Image (cartoon, rainbow, N blue to C red):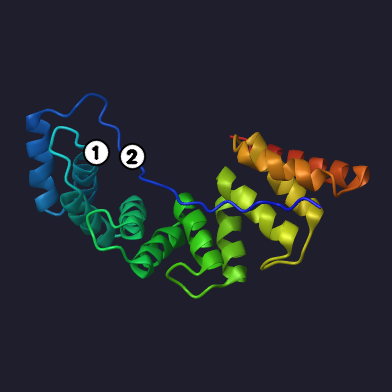
Amino acid sequence: MKKLSLVILFFYTLLVSFGAMPSPEKIAELRKAAKLGIMQDQYSLAHLYSNGLGVTKDDDKAAKWYRKAAEQGMPEAQHNLANRYRTGKGVDKDVEEAAKWFQKAAEQGAALSQADLGVAYEHGNGVEQDYTEAVKWYRKAAEQGVPEAQHNLGLMYAQGTGVTKDEVTAYMWFNVSVNNGYTYAKRNLDILGTMLTSEQITKAQVLSRKWMAQHAK
């Protein structure tokens, strides 16, 4: 029997768009505002340092300004700071700090952080392993339309990990994930399809269409 595959997900920087390359005058304005404590400008300045836009790329300075915005409660900055702790870019690698900042952003509704927090709880990365919590955060991200979280939630249902095993619901989430553009989920959708009856597949497809109709943008 073929086994379903697990994909470990982490989500990366949420970007700020400046349109064209920022001018020296714009950068000077950002620095001034960031030093005055303007949260959005702290985040924007961190983005410039993170990507080398109009300034020399500097991970230490990027982390510094992400932290300042994160400490003011900005979920995008909290998410990016968490990723820096996860990877050790501009800070010492610290999976517990990463989980802490993912949690802060996730609790404010940041979908990518909710998905990453699900990964942390599923694998015990910086938090005590807790499959029920993993399902909780995957579900929150999945309901917000994150296709990778939809796939991982499907896996939890397929394996009965942190939730009662339900292969119809698993198939539904795999199908939703595929329809939202996550092609990796197609493999597990096909494998699970060989294990279900035609009636079960039909039921799952109906559930998928209903979910997608309710969440159409």
Q: Which mark is residue 15?
A: 2
The secondary structure type at the circle numbered 1 is helix
Contact flag, marks 2 and 1 (Cβ < 8 Å):
yes
The residue positioned 16% from the left and 51% from the top of the image is: 61
Tell me: residue 171, above or below residue 161. above
The secondary structure type at the circle numbered 2 is loop
Q: Earlier in the sequence, mark 2 or mark 1?
A: 2
Q: Residue furthest top?
A: 20
Q: How crowded is mark 2: few (under 14 residues within 10 Å), some or many (20 or more)?
A: some
Query: Disc 1 residue type?
Result: Asn
Q: How many marks?
A: 2
Residue 84 drawn at (x, y percent): 31, 55
The residue positioned 91% from the left and 42% from the top of the image is: 198
The residue positioned 36% from the left and 59% from the top of the image is: 86
Q: Which residue lies furthest to the front in this view?
A: 1
Residue 202 drawn at (x, y percent): 87, 41
Q: Mark 1 points at which residue?
A: 51
